[in-house]
Amino acid sequence: QNTTLQNKRRMASLATSSSTKSSVAVNKKRVVYYYDEEVGNFYYGQSHPMKPHRIRMTHALITNYGLFKKMEVYKPYRLDERDMTLFHADDYCHFLKTVTCENEMHWGSDLEKFNIDVDCPVFDGVYRFCQISSGGSVGGAYKLNHHLSDIAVNWAGGLHHAKKSEASGFCYINDIVLSILELLKYHQRVLYIDIDIHHGDGVEEAFYTTDRVMTVSFHKYGDFFPGTGAIEDCGVLNGKYYSINVPLKEGINDQSYEYLFKPIINRIIDYYQPGAIVMQMGADSLAGDRLGCFNMTIAGHGECLSYVKTFGLPLLVLGGGGYTLRNVARCWTYETSICCNQELKNKLPYNEYYEYFAPDYLLSTLPTNMVNLNTTNDLQKILKTVDQYLKQLKHSPSVQIHPDANRKEYALNHSSKELQKQVKTANNIIQRVINKQKNTNTAVVDVFKDDQLQNKQEIDKYRIDKENDQNVDIRIPTIVRDKMIEDNREFYDGDKDQDKDNDNNHNNHNNEEMKTMAIDNNNNNKNESNTTNEPQKPAAPKPKEDNNKDESKPNPITTTSENVDKDKSKTENDNNNKSI
């Protein structure tokens, strides 16, 4: 009995040890790391914010932390002009290869054509710098394609602003697009995630019309370079809804960023089912950056990479922006440790750039007192809009959803009590709806609605509108109706300006003047008839005037001149009578 118990214990110990080894093997990722010691020698110019020296500082921290022991370190292959023309224009690549600080003035209008200016100057070794940055990214994609690694890291890459035939935003060759084109040789779909504070416009523009690459960019939007990346910009043609933009306001912190990042990425990977992921880790979204305005810490920045890593897909990790050198080196060193599953001490090890990290000499950073302008309502609107876009996507064909996951989370046993309970609940709901429809006589033959779950009020309203539409239009035209209505309103509402009274008095006065003019015309006609040469008939005797008549009151109709005319006519009549 004792021997049997000992054997059982040995078997159990072996089983536990084997299970732990298998779990370690599953969690352990093969990581390749690309670095060229020459990359720190390039210099954009005095007072230019872009400093390739930050990559050398990052490598110094990685080396002194001992992370190089957990990775395969490679010197990147330098791409030639032919490899770059897989995306970029031939004349643009030829320009970068031949232009120097000495012959820059001989290029003339080509400098403006290729957008060579203060942001993107011609510096010594610009073509070699492009070869190193793009060679590490394409080399990492090659390792992922041939299953030689699970995670590839190139902190010299991530130059996401470069366009097909012009430089932009400190970027000359878009190594991200070249690496995605390499991944598409072996993967049907590739997901690109950009957490740089600037919008990844160059990568989005390159794949704006295809559904084989989905681009997701979390960036500051508004009065900020490059000015693109609105949430309404979601792709065209076959790429419709395959470009996701998450515009943010300044001051966003770790909690708000995580509130957006995790559900969006989870939903996208669930819908899109990519074969590989390319992640741009621009460090200018950290608090205190020289050009940035976010308020994130290194821990919150690295949490995005840690979350994407949990999906277990081939992952290409690239650099990007970042203009406060000490924070860039800290951030990328910490994120390299995430790729290696290695915890680091907060106290920085001594290195040749130790003075850069004064006064605290710590790996972690703290947020500032910047105000977060991203309200909860804004974040919820972004989540709702992105969710609506993703609902328009077609699920990837012939793809198993979570093939390696626990099946109990996605399917229930037919004999389980939980399944029977859910079926019973569903049947009760269906029966309740059927009974409700029988009790309410709301069915109308001529009413056909797409949504059968409309309530009674909406159906009645729809029926009334339909009946009104079928009636003959017997309405009176507006012009006729206006002629029938007399507008009694005043010019100013509530103001009694007595327009009507003045109009009545004016009309009465005009009538009196017309009467006066008519009487004058009659008198003149009589006078003219009396003064003619023809013999006149004797005038009739004048009737006696009423002495009781009040002569003090003047006649309102006749005037003084009229009385004189009357006297003259009387005398003339008397003389005529005497002569006759």
Image: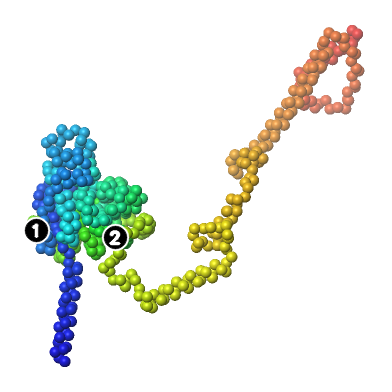
Q: Nearer the viewer, residue 327 or 301?
A: 301
Query: Label 1 neighbourhood size at 10 Å, few (<14), some (14-19), many (20+)?
Result: few
Q: From the viewer's perspective, is residue 314 above or below residue 473?
A: below
Check residue 522 in the rendering and tell me which mark sits there, or answer none. Answer: none
Left/right placement of residue 64 relative to residue 442 reads left
Q: Please, is residue 515 above or below residue 204 in the view?
A: above
Quarter holding residue 43: top left
Q: Nearer the viewer, mark 2 or mark 1?
A: 2
Q: Residue at x 74, y 23 (%)?
A: 517
Tell me the residue that label 2 is attached to. 273
Residue 153, percent from left and from top: 17, 57
Q: Residue 432 in the image: x percent, y percent? A: 51, 71
Q: Is residue 169 visible?
A: no
Left or right: 553 in relation to 197:
right
Give the residue drawn at x 12%, y 49%. 78
Per the image, label 1 sits on a secondary structure element best described as: loop
At 18% from the left edge and 82% from the top edge, which residue is drawn? 12
What is the tally of numbered marks visible in this picture? Answer: 2
Where, quadrant-wise, is the C terminus in this rendering? top right
**Residue corresponding to mark 1:** 351
Element under disc 2:
loop
Instruction: Name the residue located 55 percent from the left edge and 62 percent from the top edge.
Output: 456
- In percent of width and height, residue 6 lies at 14, 87
Q: Quadrant of residue 8?
A: bottom left
